[in-house]
Amino acid sequence: MASTEITLRVANAIGDVASEAWDACANPDTAPGWDGPGRALRGDSQPKSQDCTGELLEAPASVSKAEYNPFISHDFLSALEGSGSVRSRTGWQPMHLIAEAADGKLVGVAPCYAKSHSQGEYVFDHGWAEAYQRAGGSYYPKLQVSVPFTPATGRRLLVRPGPQAQAVRGALADGLAEICRRFDASSVHVTFPTEPEWQLLGAHDYLLRTHRQFHWENAGYDSFDAFLAALASRKRKTIRRERADALSPGIEIHWLSGPDLTESVWDAFFEFYMDTGSRKWGRPYLTRSFYSMVGEKMRDRILLVMAKRNRRWIAGAINFIGSDTLFGRHWGAIEQHPFLHFEVCYYQAIQYAIEHRLARVEAGAQGQHKIARGYLPITTYSAHYIVDQALRRAVADFLRHERAFVAEEIEEFAEAAPFRKE
């Protein structure tokens, strides 16, 4: 397949693509030597770091243009594959789409998987699958362009910066549809892309879908108390009470990152993950070796918020650190205490983001209860290419109504925000 001078091919393992080439498309290195979290917030022209004397230094001008997303990095995706969490036996067969220029240089990639089910995606199409199969069609295999098990927005058409960037994105969008037809798949699903990618995919014959999540936005707060001061009095008192109650049984909270992420810590966290995951999903998605691998590859991009009682770890939440965002993923506990979930997953994330000058916290999918904790509704996106025209028409009609419903729902949730009305 070729578009102008762009050639497309499929890689059946991310290990077949050099990490430097992948990351040049996923997270271009625009600021050599600058690797700290935190970006410009309201009132700042550039993020700052400290030298050895403690003096604030201006970051390179280009750092404000860099948007590091941990989940599309070669390190994260290779940990999923290398640990066996993602492979054909788990229903996630890698089929990454690779775009190369005439000289063989890699200029674009799309993390793509052939799926034999619809689990671990957080964008639900079970109804489409059932309807198509009742009509005599075969919905699986389908192609999924996403980060497995990760409902976090980020680029999905990963393109090396340059004058051909938009052409490469278009070639990837069309190439995914072509692969779908060639491999007799029913559809392509691009989940949690950025809004510009969503619009581009719509221009390439993909059906457009919207969803909602709850994110916390940093309005330049200099402390957790400053954040609380922005809330209505009743909400402020509730959060203070919840935080006190969560820690009252003698629970201590620890932030672990970098060299703190030892194998014994991962053993404890995996026990939490297995307990909660078994109850929530029936079978947890991630293997124990995933945590060792990602902890080795990305230790400085991971924050574990761990709770300890009587010198024993009892609960924890894993977060990944982007250039301007703290991404909360999953949590677990082996002891149940009132409000501990809110403290470990939401309040500690807010406090970390404030102290490290991150612009937002994304706390994953679902959860209307997040609104009362200062997390606001935002729109997320997905795009769907469907081969069968009858199924396509039915889904397109459904999505028209669903988009209107999601927009109304977001507006209603925003009205319930806990911030002072004035």
Image (spheres, rainbow, N blue to C red):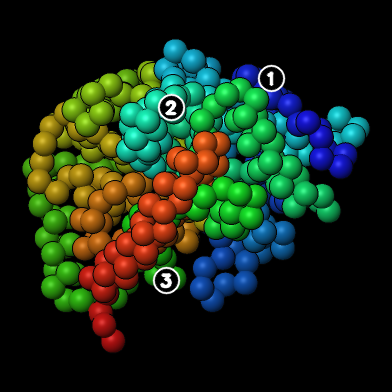
**Residue type at tag 2:** Gly
**Disc on res. 137:** 2
**Residue type at tag 1:** Asp
Q: Residue furthest top?
A: 89
Mark 2 near mark 3, Cβ–Cβ under 8 Å?
A: no
Mark 1 near mark 3, Cβ–Cβ under 8 Å?
A: no
The residue pinned by badge 1 equals 16
Q: CA distance from mark 2 to mark 1?
A: 33 Å
**x and y percent of residue 353 in the render?**
41, 56
**x and y percent of residue 361 in the render?**
40, 55
Mark 2 near mark 1, Cβ–Cβ under 8 Å?
A: no
| Closer mark to the observer between disc 2 and disc 1 | 2
Q: Residue furthest bottom?
A: 422
Q: CA distance from mark 2 to mark 3?
A: 50 Å
**x and y percent of residue 168 in the render?**
75, 45
Residue 353 in sight in this render: no
